[in-house]
């Protein structure tokens, strides 16, 4: 497809000493501080780094685009020999959507809900007059087939809400591939997906990039994913390049200290401990929203004191609903909850203040879990004041103690949530839960919105707090590697039912029920050949 | 972020810390960037406030001082002439600012107190209370408010207290709707759920968790609502059930001097007289709208393309 006459050796994309600044609080702040990048046709570059490293800004800059509030202050971006900086907008628009395309993180938010999928898939191609409508649609159906979408001939007639998240992400990939671009930019395309869906999307993307010899920039914070996709990897931090190398070289022998610390993330291991001291027990719980189908169906779970119980399952399996029932936000229809052998009331209102204090919750999105108008001191101070009646200096002292406990310091006390990074926000949420001196903390996907290195920090912190204070965790997650790292016991849930419950070692050793098997085999590994061999294995069966 | 450790540390994560500014510095900063329309609006509002506060010092004559010369033409003695029973128009305009504007402010504040509180409660409660309040508000809103106010005022009598109460209740329906709608977006946030799980009462959730997050639209609405209330009072006064004589007020001044407009063909200035209080009403409304527009743009978070 890439029949354009190109001088040999000339890279498709060449970025030299690029500098970008962002405007906030009346000043310009550097975001990208001089980065070089070269990409040949058919090559896939993986960009990794923690949030705030400038990955997405660099990805967009490769298209010659900057977000509102950002400006390019130096360097050059040349695509196929043409300089993109300073190129008039209408010329750039001729490239965008046809020769350079973009796959966004959240497909659900990026599709127009009012148009059929196939019309959105072919829009750019028809607009650029690459082909007429009929052949564009024909081609789109072929792409749907290549991406293994079900009913590929008719799926395009559906609207975005009529297909699943994983399918939508694949349709978006089809949209990006449809004009046979020279360069695709993938910005965290699988972060929002379940592991079981992620595998399918990754395999489809890998195949299609190879098939059409397209160059790609793959932005992610998931190292195992980038290991599957990229030919070479560039590590970014604070808007600067840390190092760059071929994937295998980088995986085997990273040079920089920072890269090594990224690589060691999955090394946390906790020895499981058995305990018969049950602190919380759910007995035959049924629950549903309104009069609909049961979201929880006869669920019984025992939680051991001072241990970590991981609840695993894909979205819609009922794991978050279980948390809502335990906290009393959603009264169960049948069954009972025993806390320290005393039955908890179904309704939150009827529980005593002390019972409320004993069960605390940490949310997935730390952004929405903290009032944007309250400072860190107010957020952590409120439970102290509310449950423990601490005031004045005493409260202040305890707040600082809690901040130190979560490895932050007292300079954070007057910050607003918007002045914190993702990991710091989640730490403040942990401190807020700790402030109540709880027996149990329910962690609802607390690490899934975070970068891996930040995840590791949070998990280590949670484990340390458990050792020091004997807190019980109910850890809801869809990430198997997290479960491996921190749990003592595991509950696997699927469609509102408990599939398996037991010690970590029992769950992770064969034989598995069919669903557990699928879940376990879908977790990406750091081996670059993992995806290829997994797909081959599954095809055989 | 001066020191950058080579490995991970929680305090060194990239987060942008804003510069601490005092409230005064922040106000100065945003004023320096205000567009000319906003400046115009602010200056006009400021002048009106000066007029209202210092009316007895600014006005050449008393509010209800009658001179033996009704319908006097514009002259150096009576700058804008006198009205039908010989009161100085300019003096009554200045006193009118005091009466009309302060009544409008009081009414709007009351409307916000009633509508805002009920709206927040409805948004948090979401059950029978929400249903009851929302349907009651629907009923009230179904009746044209000016006619409804006319009926109520003629039943209860046109005192200033009644005027404030009735217009406040009728206007609080709009405030209720807005507050409820914007609160619903905030109520679903995890931090409100967290406050509920903690066992916080309704009052705390309303005041501390939700209210600070819905202030910008409410403040903008306050400005607009003030304009509507102001116009309603003027309209009611024009119809004769609003502020009663001898209290000076712009709406009734328009009515009392309306017949003068027919003399415009003989004396242009006489024709202009009834338009002066009308102009005062219009100018304030426009000024408030300019300021509200600027404020809305500022808080909407829309960033002008650089």
Image: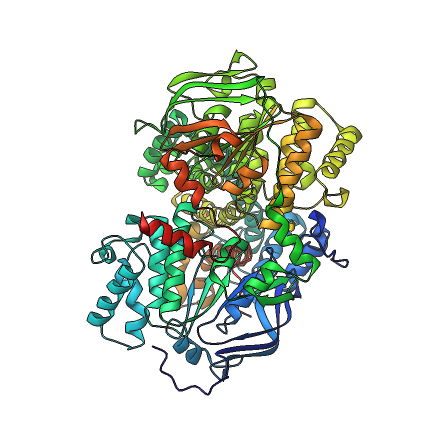
Relative vertical location of residue A82 with respect to residue B219 in this rendering, above or below: below
Residue at the image point whose x is 32% and y is 41% from the top: B144
Relative vertical location of residue B101 with respect to residue A332 in this rendering, above or below: below
Viewer-nearest residue: B180 or B95: B180
Viewer-nearest residue: A495 or B292: A495
Q: Residue B173 is drawn in which quadrant?
A: top left
Residue at the image point whose x is 72% and y is 34% from the top: A402
Coordinates of residue B125 in the picture (x, y in percent): 45, 28
Residue at the image point whose x is 53% and y is 62% from the top: A56
Quarter in which the N terminus of chain B is drawn? bottom right
Relative vertical location of residue A156 with respect to residue A429 in this rendering, above or below: below
Asked whether, in this view, residue A501 is left or right of residue A411, the answer is left
Is any part of residue A317 visible from this angle?
A: yes
Viewer-nearest residue: A296 or A57: A296
Coordinates of residue A266 in the picture (x, y in percent): 59, 46
Coordinates of residue A94 in the picture (x, y in percent): 39, 78
Is any part of residue A379 visible from this angle?
A: no
Coordinates of residue A29 in the picture (x, y in percent): 66, 65
Q: Residue A215 is drawn in which quadrant?
A: bottom left
Asked whether, in this view, residue B207 is left or right of residue A539, the answer is right
Q: Residue B76 is drawn in which quadrant?
A: bottom right
Quarter in which the C terminus of chain B is drawn? bottom right
């Amino acid at each position: 497809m890439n029949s354009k006459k190109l001088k040999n050796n000339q890279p498709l994309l060449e970025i030299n000493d690029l500098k970008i600044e962002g405007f906030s609080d009346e000043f310009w702040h550097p975001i990208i501080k001089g980065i070089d990048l070269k990409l040949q046709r058919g090559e896939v570059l993986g960009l990794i780094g923690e949030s705030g490293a400038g990955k997405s800004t660099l990805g967009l800059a490769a298209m010659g685009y900057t977000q509102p509030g950002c400006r390019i202050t130096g360097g050059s971006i040349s695509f196929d020999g043409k300089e993109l900086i300073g190129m008039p907008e209408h010329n750039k628009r001729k490239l965008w959507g046809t020769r350079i395309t973009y796959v966004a993180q959240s497909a659900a938010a990026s599709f127009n809900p009012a148009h059929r999928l196939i019309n959105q898939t072919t829009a750019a191609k028809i607009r650029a007059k690459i082909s007429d409508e009929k052949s564009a649609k024909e081609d789109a159906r072929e792409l749907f087939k290549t991406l293994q979408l079900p009913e590929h001939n008719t799926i395009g007639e559906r609207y975005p809400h009529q297909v699943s998240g994983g399918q939508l992400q694949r349709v978006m990939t089809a949209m990006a591939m449809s004009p046979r671009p020279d360069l695709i930019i993938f910005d965290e395309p699988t972060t929002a997906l379940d592991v079981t869906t992620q595998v399918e999307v990754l395999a489809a993307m890998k195949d299609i990039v190879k098939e059409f010899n397209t160059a790609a920039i793959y932005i992610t914070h998931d190292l195992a994913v980038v290991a599957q996709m990229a030919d070479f990897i560039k590590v970014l931090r604070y808007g600067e390049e840390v190092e760059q190398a071929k994937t295998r070289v980088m995986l085997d022998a990273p040079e920089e200290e920072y890269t090594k610390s990224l690589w060691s993330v999955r090394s946390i291991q906790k020895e499981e401990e058995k305990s018969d001291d049950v602190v919380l027990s759910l007995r035959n719980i049924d629950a549903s929203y309104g009069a609909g189908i049961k979201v929880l169906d006869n669920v019984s779970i025992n939680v051991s004191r001072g241990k970590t119980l991981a609840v695993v399952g894909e979205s819609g399996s009922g794991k978050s609903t279980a948390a809502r029932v335990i906290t009393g936000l959603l009264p169960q229809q049948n069954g009972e909850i025993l806390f320290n052998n005393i039955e908890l009331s179904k309704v939150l209102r009827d529980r005593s203040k002390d019972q409320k204090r004993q069960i605390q919750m940490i949310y997935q999105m730390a952004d929405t879990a903290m009032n944007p108008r309250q400072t860190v001191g107010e957020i952590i101070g409120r439970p102290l004041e509310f449950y423990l009646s601490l005031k004045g200096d005493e409260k202040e002292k305890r707040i600082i103690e809690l901040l130190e406990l979560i490895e932050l310091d007292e300079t954070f006390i007057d910050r607003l949530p918007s002045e914190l990074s993702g990991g710091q926000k989640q730490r403040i949420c942990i401190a807020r839960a700790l402030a109540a001196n709880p027996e149990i903390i329910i962690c609802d996907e607390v690490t899934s919105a975070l970068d891996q290195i930040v995840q590791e920090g949070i998990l280590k912190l949670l484990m340390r707090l458990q050792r020091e204070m004997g807190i019980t965790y109910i850890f809801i997650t869809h990430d198997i590697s997290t479960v491996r790292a921190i749990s003592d016991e595991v509950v696997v849930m699927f469609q509102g039912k408990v599939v398996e419950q037991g010690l970590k070692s029992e769950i992770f050793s064969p034989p598995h029920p069919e669903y557990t098997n699928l879940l376990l085999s879908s977790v990406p590994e750091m081996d670059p050949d993992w995806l290829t061999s997994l797909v081959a294995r599954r095809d055989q069966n | 972020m001066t020191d950058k450790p080579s490995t991970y540390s929680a305090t060194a994560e990239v987060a942008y810390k804003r510069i601490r500014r005092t409230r005064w510095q922040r106000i100065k900063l945003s004023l320096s960037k205000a567009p000319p329309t906003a400046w115009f609006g602010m200056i006009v509002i400021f002048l009106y406030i000066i007029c209202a506060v210092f009316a007895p010092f600014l006005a050449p004559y008393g509010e209800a001082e009658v001179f033996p010369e009704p319908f006097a033409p514009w002259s150096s003695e009576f700058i804008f002439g006198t009205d039908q029973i010989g009161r100085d128009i300019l003096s009554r305009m200045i006193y009118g600012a005091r009466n009309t504007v302060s009544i409008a402010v009081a009414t709007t504040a009351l409307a916000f107190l009633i509508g805002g509180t009920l709206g927040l409660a409805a948004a948090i409660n979401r059950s029978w209370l929400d249903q009851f309040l929302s349907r009651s508000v629907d009923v009230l809103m179904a009746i044209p408010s000016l006619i409804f106010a006319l009926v109520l005022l003629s039943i209860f009598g046109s005192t200033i207290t009644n005027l404030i109460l009735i217009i406040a209740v009728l206007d609080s329906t709009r405030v209720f709707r807005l507050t409820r709608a914007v609160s619903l977006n905030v109520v679903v946030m995890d931090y409100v759920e967290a406050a509920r799980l903690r066992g916080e009462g309704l009052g705390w959730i309303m005041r501390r968790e939700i209210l600070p997050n819905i202030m910008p639209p409410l403040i903008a609405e306050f400005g607009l609502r003030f304009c509507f209330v102001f116009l309603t009072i003027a309209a009611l006064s024009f119809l004769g059930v609003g502020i009663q004589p001898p209290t000076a007020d712009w709406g009734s001044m328009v009515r009392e001097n309306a017949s003068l407009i027919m003399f415009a063909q003989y004396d242009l200035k006489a024709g202009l007289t009834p338009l002066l209080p009308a102009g005062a009403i219009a100018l304030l409304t426009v000024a408030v709208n300019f300021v509200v527009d600027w404020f809305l743009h500022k808080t909407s978070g829309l960033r002008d393309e650089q």
